[in-house]
Each structure stands twice: as structure tokens, then as C-alpha cells.
Image (tube, rainbow, N blue to C red):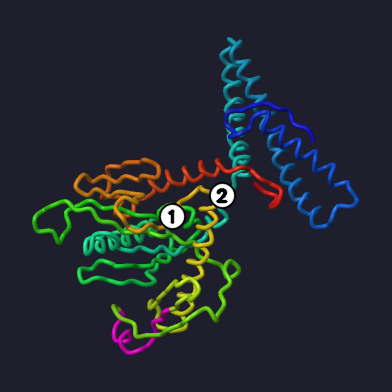
Amino acid sequence: MKVDMLTTPTIPMLDSVYVQGLQERYDKIASELIAPSLEVSQRHLLQKEMSFLTTVLNKVREINQLVAQQRDLEAQKSITADVEYLELLSEELAVVDERLNQEATSLDRLLYPSDPLDDRSVFLEIRAGTGGQEAALFAGNLVRMYTLYAAKKHWRCTLISASETDLGGYREAVLQIEGKGVYGHLKRESGVHRVQRVPATETSGRLHTSTATVAVMPEADDVDVTINPGDLRIDVYRASGAGGQHVNTTDSAVRITHIPTGLVVACQDERSQHKNKAKAMKVLQSRLLSAQKEKQDAEQSLKRKEMVGSGDRSEKVRTYNFPQNRITDHQVDLTLKNLDMVMEGALDPIVDALMQQDAADRRTKPVTFATSGKA
């Protein structure tokens, strides 16, 4: 299979040198596959890679044909004076442009696929950082903001566990947000969120800066993480908080400690001890999966080493300035003057910008085929 080496600016990395490299790799695999001494496992890997390269090169050929049509139509328009014919050429050109855009998007997804975890539901963990009671109140604000955002997206949001303060804030809280594409939307919420405002506890009217940390963990499948039961310590205790008389009389709450890592997960959301244990195990699996993914990302030098920092004011991903009704996301250098609406769950402008940045980040990775058969 051979493809022409046209160039179109709509496709990242689609130039003659890059396409030639794909073609050379295809030709090399074709010659290797005819060797009778090739091991079965290696043959399988090469066949997968060749299948992927065939798809990519076919897509390149389709794009090149569309680019040729596009250039031909534009050339005809430049030398045509007939109004009706110009209108016809413009209509044809619009169709070609639309098809070219579709094929470009398709090729981009082939070469730079999204994170396979993007479609997962998540556990979203919020902890009060620097700032005492005000940090806990801000953590409560974030719990409400994400709950409202989930409702706008028609996702199911459940408060799995929480440690409340006397003033109604949260020292820590864990939300389970279920729906298609939740992790893809929320994964870049992880980090330190900084708030600047006059606290309700401040009598002199001074502006304070406090923080809360957010960790977004994709919900793990059983096949993702294997946990040795011998590595667990499971404690049951009496639930507390809202829920009527039942929470004060039954040992339904469950706390699981993963001894090798020291991770501790608690759940008292359900009336049943069995259900609380199942939910706590799900959270633990997701934390371990998140730790594995974080380690991989760190090794690739594409993301922070730690999903959540120490909570210091300097380690921020977003700043919420209440006096100026301003919110700034430092990951994409985006500032909006509608903080009041964002706190009511209007997060889409920020999330959309972060998702676009995530797609751009994927294009910085080298495209490799040999082991997986895909980009």
C-alpha cells in the first residue's frame, strides 16, 4: 500500500516525512511477516500493528484525496466569472470542507486516542487544607458546587462519607459521581483550590486566603486492582450524623485499612454493614487504581507527581476570588467574572477548556504501535 504525500494543515504531524515513516514501518512489517521462523506471539503483535497502520494510511489517503479536491475547487473558483457556477463550486467546496474536517478528526482520534478511563464514573475526594474553619467551609462549598454540576450533567451524585465541622463545613468528604464520561470531564479538577474572601468567622472584615484539595479517582473495575484480603483490616463502628435513630444503635459503618499502603477508607452512607463494606472496597480499589495511574503519569513527565499536594497556598490549580466575583484556572490560564454562577454548578466553560488542553497534551506523546497495535 502506498499513499501520496500531500500536506494539510488541519492534521497534526501530517506531513510528508511523518507519513513516509508510517509507510516505511508498514513495508518493514510486511516483509517480516513472510518469515517462516517468526514466533506466533510476535506474528500476532505485528499483525495488530499492521492492521492499525493500514487504517491510518487509508485514512491519510482519503484525506489527501479530499485536499486535492479542495485545491481543485478553489482553483476553479479563482478563474470563474459565472455567478451560478461560482455558487455551485462554493456548495461543493463546503461539502468537501465538512468531509475533510470529519476525516481529520477521525485521524486525530486514531493517532491520539483519549484516556481509556475517561468514560468511568469517579470518586471525588475533597479535603480542607490551609485555613482552619474557613477551609472546611470552602470544602463544603466545593461539595455543593460539584453536586450541582453533576445534576446539570444528569449524573448521579452520592455523598459516600463526610467529616463535618460545627459550622457546617467539611474536614473531608467523598462523593461518588456516576455517569458516562465523568472522569474525562472531571480528572483535571485534581489539585489545590484556593479561596480568597472575608470568612463568616472574621469580625474585622479582613480578606483571608484558604485552600481545599480535590482528588478525582476513576472508579475501578475488579479486574483493574487485585487486593489480597490478608492485607486488609476491617473495623465496624456505630454511624453518626443524619439518618435518624438507626445510626446511633447499629454498628453499620465500616472502616477498611489497606495495610501495605496505609490507605484508610470509611463508609457509613448505607444502613447495611454489608453495603457499606462493598462501597468502601470500591473506594479503596479506585484509590489504588488512581495511585497506579498517577505513578505512570509521573514517569511520563506529563502530569504532577502527586494528584494532590500538601494543601499549601502556593500549590494551586484554581483561585476563587469572592470579592471580585472572579475565578481563575491556572492550568489553562482562564479567568471568568462569574464566580457566583460557577459555585451554582456552571462549570462547563472551565471543564471544556481543560478537556481541550488535555487533548492538546495527548498530542505531545510520541505515537507508538509496536506493543499495543494502537496509537
Q: Which residues lie in the magenta part?
A: 243-255
Instruction: Say whether disc 2 or disc 1 marks the residue closer to the N-terminus.
Output: 2
Q: Is residue 283 left or right of residue 213?
A: right
Amino acid type assigned to the residue bearing label 2 in the image: Ser
> Would residue 50 be counted in the magenta stretch?
no
The percent position of residue 85, horizontal first and vertical second, equals: 61, 16
Q: What's the residue at 41%, 81% (across, down)? A: 254
Query: Secondary structure under badge 1?
Result: helix
The percent position of residue 343, horizontal first and vertical second, equals: 29, 54
The residue at the far right in this view is 36
> Would residue 253 be counted in the magenta stretch?
yes
Q: Is residue 163 left or right of residue 114?
A: left
Q: Is residue 13 left or right of residue 314?
A: right
Q: CA distance from mark 2 to mark 1?
A: 14 Å
Image quadrant holding the N terminus, namely top right
Q: What's the residue at 40%, 76% (across, down)? A: 267
Q: Are marks 2 and 1 in contact (CB under 8 Å)?
A: no
Query: Secondary structure under badge 2?
Result: loop
Dot 2, how many residues are within 10 Å of its Cα: few (below 14), some (14-19), or many (20+)? some
Query: Quick check: 269 above or below 314?
Result: below
Q: What's the residue at 68%, 26% (across, down)? A: 6
Amino acid type assigned to the residue bearing label 1 in the image: Leu
The percent position of residue 108, horizontal first and vertical second, equals: 60, 40
Query: Quick check: 331 above or below 88?
Result: below
Residue at mark 1: 186
Q: What's the residue at 27%, 71% (across, down)? A: 164
Residue at mark 2: 114
Dot 1, how many residues are within 10 Å of its Cα: few (below 14), some (14-19), or many (20+)? many
State how many labels appear.
Answer: 2
Q: Tell which of 334 and 369 is nearer to you.
A: 369
Query: Quick check: 66 above or below 267?
Result: above
